[in-house]
Amino acid sequence: MSKLQTIEIKRGEGKWISFTIKRNGVIYDVSENVFFLGVKKDISQMGYEYSISDSKFDKTDASAGVVRANIPASQTLKMVIGDYVSELKTIITNDKDVDKSQTFIIKIITSVITG
């Protein structure tokens, strides 16, 4: 298994995470796609530490294949220092039977100010 991409966020700070979606290696319009982001401390955990439903995604640049998800400072302040397994999932509307997902790591790191 290849190493997962890691996104670092300081505890107590918010961060917008940008995703560029490709299909068969080509960027495509995801305006009609439905998105979900789930964040867990451990993959075996039943519920999510944090999740973002489709309506909370910034789709301003969706026609260029870009969507953004926000993890606010109020959420990262609740999270313990360490790695969280995360997954972005999209339902490709044109192929209603096809879901695509990408797993990555969100690493909460110590902030000098919030500790």
Image (cartoon, rainbow, N blue to C red):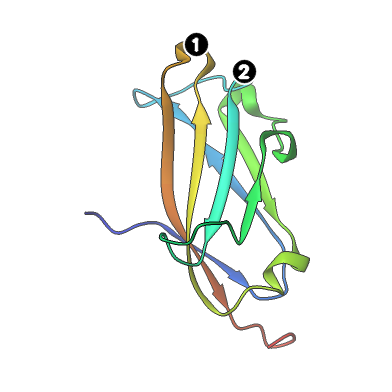
- Tell me: residue 99, above or below residue 95: below
Secondary structure category for the residue under label 2? loop
Image spot of residue 103 (x, y percent): 41, 49
Decide: few, some or many residues near mark 2? Use Cα within 10 Å; few <14, some 14-19, many ≥20: few
Local crowd size for mark 1, using a 10 Å CA cut-off: few (<14), some (14–19), many (≥20): few
Q: In this image, 47 relative to 58: left or right?
A: left
In this view, the residue in front, 106 or 38, is: 38
Q: Residue at x 59, y 33 (%)?
A: 35
Relative to 18, is 54 above or below?
above
Query: Which residue sits furthest top?
Result: 94
Identify the residue at horizontal 64%, vertical 57% (top origin).
50
| Point 56% across, 73% down: residue | 108
Q: Is residue 71 above or below residue 93?
A: below
| Residue denoted by label 1 | 94
Disc 2: which residue:
32
* Extreme-left residue of the structure: 1
Q: Amino acid at mark 1?
A: Asn
Q: Quadrant of the N terminus?
A: bottom left
Mark 1 or mark 2: whose residue is earlier in sequence:
2
Asked whether the residues under the numbered discs 1 and 2 touch, taking CB atoms below 8 Å apart as contact, a structural biologist would say yes
What amino acid is at disc 2? Glu
Quadrant where the C terminus is found in the figure: bottom right
Q: Check the image and report above or below for 13 versus 22.
A: below
Q: Position of residue 80 (x, y in %)?
A: 59, 78
Name the residue at 66% across, 83% down: 111
From the top left corner, tell me how far across and down residue 12 is, in percent. 72, 74
